[in-house]
Amino acid sequence: MDSYPLSLLALQAFTGLALGAVYVLLATGLSLIFGLLQVVNFAHGAFFMVGAYAGVFLFGMTGNFWVCLLGVPVLIGLGGLAVERVLVRPLYGRGIDDPLLLTFGLSYVMVEVVRLLWGKGGIPFDTPDLLQGAVDIGVGYFPLYRLFVIGVAAAVMLALWLLIERTRMGLVIRAGARDPVIARVLGLDVGRVWMLVFGLGTGIAGLAGLLAAPLQGASPEMGATVLAEAFVVTVVGGMGSLGGGVAAGLLLGVVVSMTSLFAPEMAKVSMYALMALVLLVRPQGLFGRAGAA
């Protein structure tokens, strides 16, 4: 530890926060769908991957990253609305396994469609000109784009919290999730609420894929890896807990980043080790409630 200057450790921690911001967006969409719909969405990683490719497509059409930033979540969210309405909705009330298996199969279909359209190889996605370069953050120079990713994740989480906790629509969402029968008796269209929640969750996953594309490019297999990582974040934070997903995403991002500095070969293993440790102490996760899973 003494051989590493404090500035290097601080920069590595900021790198972990940028990675954690992507984890937060992924886990938020996953946790939102599970917490309110009780659906384990195994196609979440595929929506993340499609978000990256949708960004590639829109950028090729418009040449404007800001159009992609607005358009990708909308397009992927609309796709999520269609998936919930046509495929997932008929499986409500049939246990947790049926939607899980359906979304698991759907993820393979989405990957194969992307391979047919764009090929099996990866596609690079350049960082927008305005966000290239580095800025001085006090402990050294840090890539501007990674700071942008952190800022976007923070803005999305704030907007999501305001939506759920401070709006009438959020009240309807929470009511429909807590007791859908009573909500229907009161005249609420619970089916529409669930469809919107599913679309919102997949839209956030698509946004995460777009933000990750300049960091790692777009490839058909990128969703499989992040799906496992998103589940780790969700389990550590607590199934269905949005606040837990934020805390766990940032924590795991920093842990992976710092481990890659001291022991690069153990970087990915560290997140699973931390998950095992958390589950030994708190089986429901950091902020989850007992029995939620």
Image (tube, rainbow, N blue to C red):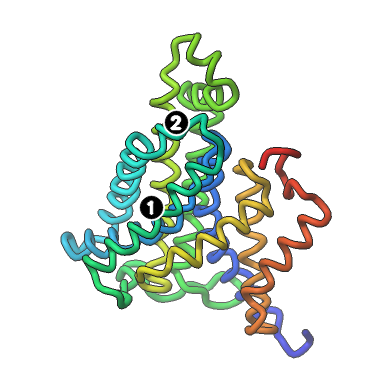
Q: Which amino acid is tagged 1?
A: Leu
Q: Secondary structure at mark 2?
A: helix
- The x, y position of residue 210, in whole percent, is 37, 60
Q: Residue at x 44, y 10 (%)?
A: 187
- The x, y position of residue 157, in whole percent, is 52, 45
Farthest left residue?
A: 61
Question: Which quadrant does the C terminus fall into?
Answer: top right
Q: Residue at x 41, y 47 (%)?
A: 202
The answer to whether marks 1 and 2 mark residues whose Cβ atoms lie closer than 8 Å is no
Q: Indicate the quadrant where residue 54 lies.
A: bottom left
Q: Mark 1: give few (<14), some (14-19) or many (20+) Cα within 10 Å.
A: some
Q: Residue at x 80, y 50 (%)?
A: 282
220 is higher (above) or lower (below) than 98: below
* Left or right of 274, for residue 239: left
* Residue to which mark 1 is pinned: 106
Q: Which amino acid is tagged 2?
A: Trp
The answer to whether residue 272 is visible is: yes
Question: Which quadrant does the N terminus fall into?
Answer: bottom right
Q: Mark 2: give few (<14), some (14-19) or many (20+) Cα within 10 Å.
A: many
Q: Residue at x 35, y 42 (%)?
A: 83
- The x, y position of residue 13, in whole percent, is 64, 70
24 is higher (above) or lower (below) than 79: below
* Residue to which mark 2 is pinned: 194
Q: Secondary structure at mark 1?
A: helix
228 is higher (above) or lower (below) than 239: below
* Left or right of 181, for residue 187: left
The tag earlier along the polypeptide, 1 or 2, is 1
Asked whether 50 or 135 is in front, the reply is: 50
Q: Which mark is residue 155?
A: none
Q: CA distance from mark 1 to mark 2?
A: 19 Å
- The x, y position of residue 234, in whole percent, is 61, 51
